[in-house]
Amino acid sequence: MYAEEKLKIAMLSLLETEPFSDITVTKVCLHSKVSRPTFYHHYTSLANLAFQSVLYRTSKDLPGIESWEDLLIQFRDLLLYLRDNKTLCDHISSPEVRREFMIYLESLLKKAVKRQETLLNYYLSPINEQFVSHSFAEMFISLIREYFSSDMTIDPNIVTTQCQALLGNAVATSIRGFMRLDQQS
């Protein structure tokens, strides 16, 4: 087993018993039997490891999440996993882990925005592209928060459908809106 995988498994194990705020790099390293320099070679922070660990757990038996479409295909399974592991879900609800999730979503959304730009035969400025990616990542996270605040009783299919709708016409409409703004200036 590779060090990176050992660290993820150790983090998940610790998250099952204690809140994220109580976990330290030292604890993770001791639990995984991996050195501190190796930890920092693979991860930038504990939040980065926590997020990557949950992603690893939910997609372990599935194809890798490389694009927005991959995430949407696996999104329902992710919601079901979090519902069935509510303690872990409560333990990772720190601002640092949410920030890691936001960074990850924005990188996937940028790929989707680029594809929409190609379909529309248009190029967004980097500022507009960042705004679109950030806005849709925020909406995606707010849908997940809504799911959690309902004590995860909303049908995961509904949340998945809402997330899929975010990327279809919504992104294309946003890009068209920026095209009109750019043409006016």
Image (tube, helix red, strand yellow):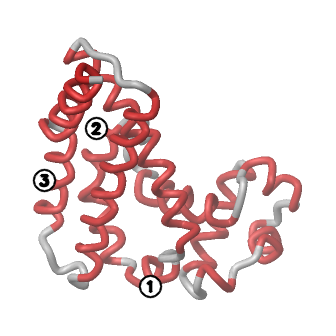
Residue 104 coordinates in the image, percent (x, y): 48, 48
Residue 16 coordinates in the image, percent (x, y): 54, 82
Mark 3 / mark 2, whichever is N-terminal = 2
Mark 2 / mark 1, whichever is N-terminal = 2
Q: Which amino acid, by three-letter code, is at mark 1?
A: Thr
Relative to 109, say whether 150 is above or below: below
Decide: few, some or many residues near mark 2? Use Cα within 10 Å; few <14, some 14-19, many ≥20: some
Closer to the camera, 156 or 118? 118
Which residue matches tag 2?
69
| Disc 3, SS | helix
Residue at 33 percent of width and 41 percent of height: 132
Relative to 19, say whether 156 is above or below: above
Question: Given the current orientation, which residue lies at the most extreme front position?
Answer: 185
Which residue matches tag 1?
87
Residue 99 appears left or right of 85: right
Q: Which amino acid, by three-letter code, is at mark 2?
A: Glu
Closer to the camera, 5 or 69? 69
| Disc 1, SS | helix
The residues tagged by marks 2 and 1 sit, at their Cα atoms, a distance apart of: 28 Å
The residues tagged by marks 3 and 1 sit, at their Cα atoms, a distance apart of: 26 Å
The residues tagged by marks 3 and 2 sit, at their Cα atoms, a distance apart of: 12 Å
Decide: few, some or many residues near mark 3? Use Cα within 10 Å; few <14, some 14-19, many ≥20: few
Which residue matches tag 3?
161
Mark 3 / mark 1, whichever is N-terminal = 1
Residue at 35 percent of width and 24 percent of height: 124
Residue at 41 percent of width and 58 percent of height: 58
Viewer-nearest of labels 2 and 1?
2
| Disc 2, SS | helix
Residue 112 appears left or right of 27: left
Residue at 54 percent of width and 57 percent of height: 100
Residue 152 appears left or right of 33: left
Q: Which amino acid, by three-letter code, is at mark 3?
A: Thr
